[in-house]
Amino acid sequence: MKPYIVVVRGLILEDNRILLLKRSANSRTNPGLWELPGGKMLDGETLDRTLEREIYEETGLKVCPIRVLGAFQQEFPFKVSVNIIFQVRVRGGVLRLSDEHEAYKWVDEINNLKVSPWLAEFKKFYGLK
């Protein structure tokens, strides 16, 4: 059986547009695909703290969680990733990217983008364009 890891993701809205990040082409998981900011939970961390830390590391934005929107899993050859998606509110910071991502976009629809498999499921479940 493959190990499960917990990943938290933040849905950041601004003017009815969603912030998406494009994974670096040399990433081990989902290279070149678009996704919501977030990352793996560390031992002893809470979901809230992981969300705040990961989004800050990846975007430079300080956020606070509002509510859980859903959970979607993605299977890899070496693990199963359980992505917990939160709606978040930005409370400060300046948008900038870490080395994990090569681009960002504010989008009002996701249809024409190559997205991570878990984000495609999330999109269908919530009826996003």
Image (cartoon, rainbow, N blue to C red):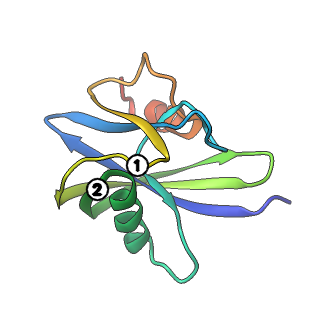
In the rendered view of the protein, which quadrant contains the N terminus? bottom right
Q: Which mark is residue 102?
A: none
Left/right of residue 129 with respect to residue 91 in the rendered view? right
Please name the amino acid that badge 2 sits on.
Gly
Element at label 1: loop
Give 109 or 33, whichever is nearer the viewer. Answer: 33
Q: Residue at x 58, y 63 (%)?
A: 6
Q: Residues within 10 Å of mark 1 (few under 14, many from 20)?
A: many
Q: Residue 38 location in percent, x, y?
A: 44, 54
Position of residue 106 relative to residue 2, above or below, is above
Position of residue 114 relative to residue 87, above or below, is above
Which residue is the site of mark 1? Answer: 37
Which residue is the site of mark 2? Answer: 60
Q: Residue 108 location in percent, x, y?
A: 26, 26
First in sequence: mark 2 or mark 1? 1
Q: Residue at x 37, y 71 (%)?
A: 48
Q: Residues within 10 Å of mark 2 (few under 14, many from 20)?
A: some
In the rendered view of the protein, which quadrant contains the C terminus? top left
Element at label 2: loop
Please name the amino acid that badge 1 sits on.
Pro
Q: Nearer the viewer, mark 2 or mark 1?
A: 2
